[in-house]
Image (cartoon, coloured by chain):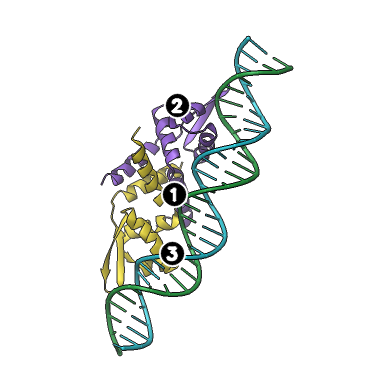
Chain colours: A yellow, B purple, C green, D cyan
Amino acid sequence: MPKEETLYDLAELFKVFGDSTRIKILWALDEAEMCVCDIAALLNMTQSAISHQLRVLKQAKLVKNRKEGKVVYYSLDDEHVKEIFKQGLIHINE
Amino acid sequence: MPKEETLYDLAELFKVFGDSTRIKILWALDEAEMCVCDIAALLNMTQSAISHQLRVLKQAKLVKNRKEGKVVYYSLDDEHVKEIFKQGLIHINE
DNA sequence: TGAACATATGAATAATTGTTCATATGTTCA
DNA sequence: TGAACATATGAACAATTATTCATATGTTCA
């Protein structure tokens, strides 16, 4: 069994995945880089809600961003996300 | 992008993984079938707390149990758990 | 039968969290 | 400069949740 701290970090990571809004954001960003307002429009949610969640995702190092004028574009910062999601989907479809 | 319901289910699954007590239980059960009181002793937690969490894990179809006299043994009910954890660990160690 | 034990469960509590609302920051452009 | 726009952020609120405590259920065995 890995040490306490590692298991705690693992739980923290999955906690980030444990919200459908964040899952949707990650899935959207896996398909294309997007700005905040486009994500908000796509998911039919407020800009504020999306911005808050993007912060959580950024802190977890799952997304990165770049600024272009007044627009901030977000994209995935981890190539394992999709793989983890796939494994999860396998479990669900059983 | 998968349909709404699928993403919701995916988030629900990760929510179950998003607690270090449950992560520990799953990791322990991956190594060996165990009864409730042994898990409680191993994790240094109350029998009640473990029992509550085992129920969550059972509902998520992640563990199964068998009764032998007054003792209930729990074991993993999904072979993808370890794989998902591994992917998560890869992300953490970056 | 009754004591001892293993487990399950419901209520209560404290802590965490997702969204909203209001507003601040920063950029573009007329 | 000032209006319009994109984004970030802090406070507040409602909802969810992990643990504890008390207790119920069910089993073994003397």
Which-is-in-front pick, marks 2 and 3? Answer: 3
Protein chain holding label 2: B
Q: Nearer the viewer, residue A10 or B1?
A: A10
Q: Nearer the viewer, residue B67 or B53?
A: B53
Q: Residue at x 27, y 74 (%)?
A: A69
Q: Which of the two discs, 2 and 1, labels the residue nearer the N terminus? A: 1
CA gap, disc 2 to disc 1?
26 Å
Residue D20 location, quadrant: top right
In the structure shown, which secondary structural element does the residue marked by tag 2 occupy? loop
What's under tag 3, amino acid-wise?
A: Ala
Percent position of residue B28, x then y: 41, 31
Q: Nearer the viewer, residue B57 or C2?
A: C2
Q: Residue at x 38, y 69 (%)?
A: A37
Q: Which mark is residue A49?
A: 3
Protein chain holding label 3: A
Protein chain holding label 1: B
**Mark 2 lies on residue:** B33
What's under tag 1, amino acid-wise?
A: Leu
